[in-house]
Image (cartoon, grey):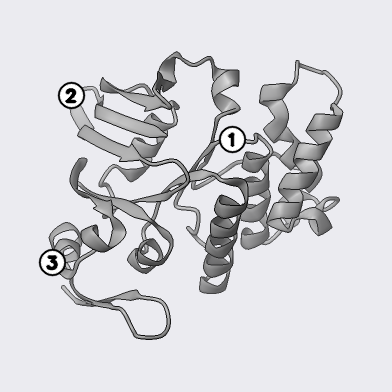
């Protein structure tokens, strides 16, 4: 589905990511982990063609992402940032409808296909009951689901999520990640997401790439990458990975 081939990105003479090569399979959830400043957000933005790489290329189903026209690209890939922005006064349905921009001519009325896509996205994310609410009046967890619905309204094949659980309490983090997993299976999406919490990466990702100082330290199946030795190497903390006989696995940080 997605191939990142020798990608680097620099600001002036300062490298942010260097020589990153990854392959994401169709239908999987791929996590990008690493400490603050490792380059996770930059990698996702380059992969989504929101930034142009200094060197290397990003291929979506064999086609260079940066050669796909913007509107055509938006029909195939959607990006949900860590800090999505919305103006004041918009109702939830209007926010979700913004995801249809790639399918509509400017000022053109909504088509039946647009309305169906918006309804389906709101149904999938449980945001239909919020349709007439002012978006800025919502809680953080509710608003994150609205922005997810907006991304789904694009009807993408590939969904990029940059720290989707950032600034949410634990309950909303779990609810959102369970929702993403459900949507990924239901819609057959390929999901690439940057995650800060290693336990969530262990539970929700099929594969992961671990970044440190802008370089890939390891990539592959989640179990093969998220080992105690690797966590200590990348994050500088002693830890224990717990896989109980019953219940989900977790990463316990013991100390530095």
Mark nearest the camera among 3 and 2 is 3
Instruction: Report helix, strand or loop for mark 1.
Output: loop
Foreground pick, 149 / 38: 149
Q: Which residue is mark 3?
A: 229
Question: What quarter of the picture does the C terminus occupy?
Answer: bottom left
Residue 123 position, x and y percent, is 76, 53
Q: CA distance from mark 3 to mark 2?
A: 32 Å
| The label number, if any, that marks residue 132 in the structure image | none
* Residue drawn at point x = 60 percent, y = 19 percent: 71
Provide the residue designation for mark 1: 156
To which residue does mark 2 refer? 13
Q: Position of residue 110 (x, y in %)?
A: 84, 27
Q: How many marks?
A: 3
Q: Residue at x 15, y 64 (%)?
A: 236
Q: Is residue 176 left or right of residue 52?
A: right
Where is residue 240? Give x, y as percent: 22, 77
Q: Residues within 10 Å of mark 1 (few under 14, many from 20)?
A: many
Please provide percent x and percent y for residue 134: 79, 50
- Of callouts 2 and 1, the N-terminal one: 2
Mark 2 crowdedness (10 Å alpha carbons): few <14, some 14-19, many ≥20: few
Q: CA distance from mark 3 to mark 1?
A: 36 Å
Q: Is residue 24 visible?
A: yes
Residue beneath the point at 62% across and 61% down: 141
Q: Residue at x 15, y 65 (%)?
A: 232
Element assignment for label 3: helix
Q: How packed is label 3: few (under 14 Cα within 10 Å), some, or many (20 or more)?
A: some
- Which of the two marks, 3 or 1, is nearer to us in this view? 1
């Amino acid at each position: 589905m997605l191939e990142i081939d020798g990608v680097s990105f620099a600001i002036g003479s300062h490298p942010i990511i260097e020589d990153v090569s990854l392959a994401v399979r169709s239908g999987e959830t791929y996590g990008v982990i690493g400490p603050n400043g490792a380059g996770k957000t930059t990698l996702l933005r380059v992969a989504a063609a929101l930034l142009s790489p200094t060197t290397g290329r990003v291929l979506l189903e064999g086609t260079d992402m940066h050669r796909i026209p913007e509107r055509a690209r938006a029909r195939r890939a959607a990006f949900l940032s860590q800090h999505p922005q919305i103006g004041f006064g918009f109702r939830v349905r209007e926010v979700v409808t913004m995801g249809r921009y790639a399918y509509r001519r400017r000022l053109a009325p909504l088509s039946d296909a647009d309305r169906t896509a918006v309804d389906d996205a709101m149904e999938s994310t449980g945001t239909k009951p919020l349709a007439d609410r002012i978006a800025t009046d919502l809680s953080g967890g509710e608003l994150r689901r609205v922005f997810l619905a907006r991304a789904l309204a694009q009807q993408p094949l590939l969904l990029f999520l940059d720290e989707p659980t950032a600034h949410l309490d634990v309950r909303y983090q779990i609810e959102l990640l369970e929702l993403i997993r459900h949507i990924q299976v239901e819609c057959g999406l390929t999901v690439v997401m940057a995650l800060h919490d290693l336990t969530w990466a262990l539970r929700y990702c099929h594969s992961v790439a671990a970044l440190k100082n802008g370089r890939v330290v390891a990539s592959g199946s989640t179990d093969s990458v998220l080992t105690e030795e690797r966590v200590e190497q990348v994050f500088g903390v002693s830890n224990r990975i717990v896989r109980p006989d019953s219940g989900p696995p977790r990463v316990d940080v013991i100390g530095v």
